[in-house]
Amino acid sequence: MTVKYALTAIALSGALGAGPAFAQPAGAVKPAPIKPVEPPTKPVEPVPFEVLRGLANEAAMFAGALDALRTNPFERAHEATPFAGAHLADLAFQDRERTAEERAKMHEVDAKQRDVDARQRERDREARAYDEGMRHIYESRWERAIERFNDVTEMKGTKVDAALYWRAYSQDRLGQRAEALSTIGALTREHQNSRYLQQARALEAEVRRNAGQPVRPQDQADEDLKLMAIAALQNSAPEQAIPMIDKLLQGTASPKLKERALFVLAQSNSAQAREVLKGIAKGNSTPELQSRAITYLGQHGGRESRAVLAEIYSSTSDIDSKKRIIRALAMGGEKDRVLAAAQSEQNPELRAEAVRQLGMHGGHAELSQLYAKETSPEIKKQIISSMAMGGNATRLTEIARTEQDPELRRSAIRGLGMMGTRGGADVLVEIYNAERDPNVKKTVISALGMQNNAAALVAIARKETDSTLKKEIVSRLSHMGNSKVATDYMLEILNGK
């Protein structure tokens, strides 16, 4: 309706510019012959009353406008001009409003994404600083470790309590007892739920015990001797070794010694050792040791240990711990449990991790099953990526040929390109020759270019009649300077063949 009124207004305002020619009749107009109305070929559906009334009103308005125009075209045209301008201005305003709303929505989405990206960058920066600090501790570079942990505390992220503990640890190793006690005090006051509190209390007791004593350079040698003693005791008297290892893990030994002791514990077949390992995996120690314990349970434990991991997964809300458990379960061959996480997990990060682990550990059947049931295009893309990572060319080929969603087809084609197999190249050429969608064809060209498959690209270029696609192929071939096939084809083009 609005468009029709606007066009009418524009036509009326145009009469002003037409002048007398518009008002003067050019001659007698012969009436058009009236043809008889033929019966409809199919029953006409009844028109609703509201629609009929609207059409009648519109016709009346239009008839009135014509009568007025016949009476005094110049006056009516002058009257119509502001109406047309106002109406067009109103339409333009509505368009601007719609555009502004769309832009506002886009800005809102962009702002949210920028916020998410900014938070992720901060987390990454914090993780890098923390990892550097831990590396300095492993290398006994205490001053550098303190610097990096100071950086972490200033970021006020999720690792502040861990950074405070390791800063105090480094300060103690440098003989800075007062500074170490001050740092421990900040940790206990500001992070009362920290998992480092038990370690911090043990460290505080050790710092107070060593107050006034010089730094002991023989600490590293002492730790090496302790580790040798633990390993020997584990072989000769394991029932005595386990309590000693447990005590060491709860104490203030270096992270390197604790990890070695945990490894010795993981090698043990005793039920007592398994219980200590399970306790640490459940979070009865620092996050670093928990991560190691989870990995060892997945690698060295049996189905019972992996059942414990599944139990921990259900009870914890920590995303990083859950990711580690998914990786440990996949490493231990528990594909059913990983598939369950991929199917039912609400957190997109965890679902993506489960899908990735299935691809890395040969879960072809599980990924195919998951793809068939999945409705989210984004998750399906992740599944396709995992299929490519796992080398499942058969399923990727099927998706590339039969998937209805063009974006998913293109993802499968890219996956085949990444795999680089001879059979994959043949499939890509077949898909190209049968395809009509130019975007899908471009993806095939890109996939073949990824494989540096000049022969296949030249073969499809010879048959291609679309100039845009042919340019795309030639562009890909131009980056294959070491290929004789590509060079020969370029010469053909230059020679006009």
Image: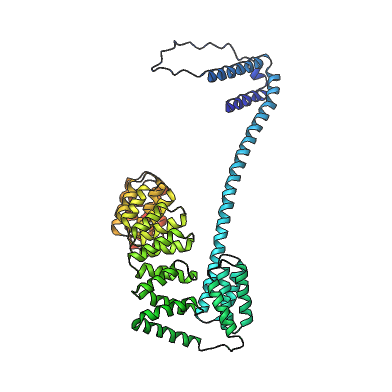
Q: Position of residue 165 (x, y in %)?
A: 56, 74
Is residue 417 visible from the viewing direction of this image?
no
Can residue 180 be seen by looking at this rendering? yes
Q: Is residue 458 above or below residue 272?
A: above
Query: Could you say which quadrant of the image residue 481 lies in?
Result: bottom left
Q: Nearer the viewer, residue 84 or 77?
A: 84
Q: Using the image as rendered, state which of residue 334 and residue 453 is in the foreground.
A: 334
x 33%, y 55%: residue: 366
Residue at figure coordinates x 62%, y 18% from the top left: 61
Please provide percent x and percent y for residue 26: 60, 15
Query: In x, y percent, where is residue 57?
Result: 59, 18
Q: In what quadrant of the picture does the N terminus appear? A: top right
Q: Nearer the viewer, residue 496 or 129?
A: 129
- In the image, is 347 to the left or to the right of 374? right
Q: How many marks?
A: 0
Q: Residue 104: which quarter of the image?
A: top right
What colour scheme has been applied to the protein in the rendered image? rainbow
Front in this rendered view, residue 139 or 31:
139
Q: Is residue 259 left or right of residue 162?
A: left
Q: What residue appears at the point 34 percent right and 82 percent down from the top-left corner?
A: 235
Relative to 279, is 378 above or below?
above
Expressed as whole percent of the image width and height from the top left, the position of residue 168 reads: 58, 77
Q: Is residue 379 left or right of residue 423?
A: right
